[in-house]
Amino acid sequence: MKKYITTPIYYINGAPHVGHAFTTILGDVLKKFEQMRGNDVFYTTGTDEHGQKNQSSCQECGMAVQDFIDMRSGNFQKLFDAMKIDYDFFVHTSSQQHKNVVKDALDYIYKKGLIKKKSYEGLYCEGCEQFKKPSDLDEHGNCPDHQKAPKLITEENYFFPLEQDRQWLIDYINTHPDWIKPKRFAKEVLGMLAEPLDDLCISRPKSRVWLGVDLPFDDDFVTYIWFDALINYISSIGWKSQGDNAAFNETWAHCTHLLAKDILKTHAVYWPIMLKALGIEPPEHLIVHGYWLGEGGIKMSKSLGNVVDPYEVMDLMGIDPLRFYLCNAMSLSGDAQISIDLLKQGYKQLANNIGNLQMRVLKMIAKNLDGKVPSAAHLEAEDKALLENVANTFERIYKYGEPSLELVNELSAEILKAGDAVNAYFATQAPWVLAKDESKRERYEAVIYTTLDALRLIAVAVYPFMPSIAKKILVSLGQNDEIKAEFKPVVLKEGTQTIVGDPLFPFIA
Ligand code: MSP
């Protein structure tokens, strides 16, 4: 099956941080998970390069527009490349290809008579790039997300009415309980739909915002940033209003958007109604996550010095443990915490669990068995039960699991549980004692075999989170590093040469 996974496209008014890194890593983890199950995946990420926020930032930098876009967008791409994210397409909303699709879509909707021009007065938050209602503001009249008072703006603009599709959207959510995951966010959207929807202002006068896509029917205006940005999800896979959309339709059929809760309304309210106007079905799923906060649940900010820099983390521990921590620690019910100390704790847990197991067993067979995988001929019931338990757990998740936060949480937790169970087995069986007694040779070999084969299963299961650690383990077990979601126990062949390599998780202070 062909699957399509997207991340939000990120504003370039600042540097990428661990929040952006997370959604992009999550997409890569889900892509690998799907590929292991034999699905084809097209994965996009990228940058949102228009709008007032980026324009102000460009002006502050005093750079030529294209140089600014290239430099700032390049910072995101460099980070994602450094994190070895396997994206298939990097979106630039300033590209001609994207701009053409935005114009095509607007023109199509305009010609259908769905866009109206009118004068409007409203409170505009530049941080959100959105008009706010007084009820959206906190008790000081500030935008709760940006802690700034929005500006009162009066202008003529073009509008796209939403209200006529409100009931349709409510019905869609109620009849597609899996559309928005986790479910609590679907409830939140139904709350947003409890009141009539205001018309969406889809233009900005060029006198105020010049960094954008010209409206095809009035070049005194540019397109509202969100109307432009959301279209990336269809421009990236070649949608057009006229002609053959067969390839587009095939990819769009199984599309999952990843996003954090900050942009739920744009994705779960504006976007499906825009798509309906274009004659396109809503994306198959939205996976919504909470925020990463600093330790103690405090918002990350430069002034508090608690912003986690992905480069600093990668220098300290490499990318794989960061990926694992993020997927394991993201909460299903709220926000999650991250700090260098918390990451170090996560790293030590991996070192004590998978790292320790691999090093101990490989060193032992290097000493006593010339580094060769022993025979499986004398496995006892408890050895087989351990292997079957580990294999069945992973088999179930890979076979029936659907991409979601629950899935990455469950799979990462089961990997740690399996590691704990095999470590406990190894400690109880005490193969170092068995090794000293020639009469216990068969038992010794069975215990070593069981441990090695369990480690192999764990390596395969952990691949989406820690691809290079997974491959290192498989190579150390004398396996090739081709990864498929196959979880049969007792697969290692007797006599296979293993290799004690460097520690998987070297000591960090
Ligand atoms: N440009 C819009 C998105 C347009 S998509 C059609 C935008 N950009 S953003 O730069 O603000 O990125 C927001 C997204 O970045 C969040 O939805 C989330 O994916 C990620 N995150 C940014 N900070 C985050 C945290 N602190 N925690 C978790 N995710 C965070 O909105």
Image: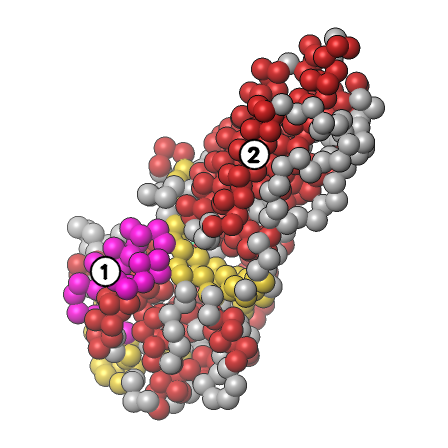
Secondary structure at badge 2 equals helix
Quarter where residue 256 is shown: bottom left
Q: The C terminus is located in which quarter? A: top right
Can you give x and y, in whole percent of width and height, for residue 15 in the image?
51, 53
Q: Residue at x 40, y 77 (%)?
A: 280
Q: Is residue 79 visible?
A: no
Q: Residue at x 63, y 37 (%)?
A: 489
Q: Nearer the viewer, residue 6 or 220?
A: 6
Can you give x and y, in whole percent of width and height, for residue 16 in the image?
51, 52
Give the magenta part as a residue range.
173-200
Q: Is residue 200 visible?
A: yes
Q: In the image, is 218 to the left or to the right of 63?
A: left
**Label 1 beta carbon within 8 A of ligand 1:** no
Q: Residues within 10 Å of mark 1 (few under 14, many from 20)?
A: some
* Residue 176 versus residue 353 in the image, above or below: below
Secondary structure at badge 1 equals helix
Q: CA distance from mark 1 to mark 2?
A: 43 Å
Q: Residue at x 56, y 34 (%)?
A: 388
Question: Which residue was labeled with disc 1?
Answer: 190
Residue 196 shown in magenta: yes
Q: Nearer the viewer, residue 431 or 272?
A: 431
Q: In the image, is 362 to the left or to the right of 307?
A: right
Q: In the image, is 103 to the left or to the right of 324?
A: left
Determine the residue located farthest toward the right in the rendered image. Answer: 370
Q: Amino acid at mark 1?
A: Leu
Question: Which residue was labeled with disc 2?
Answer: 388
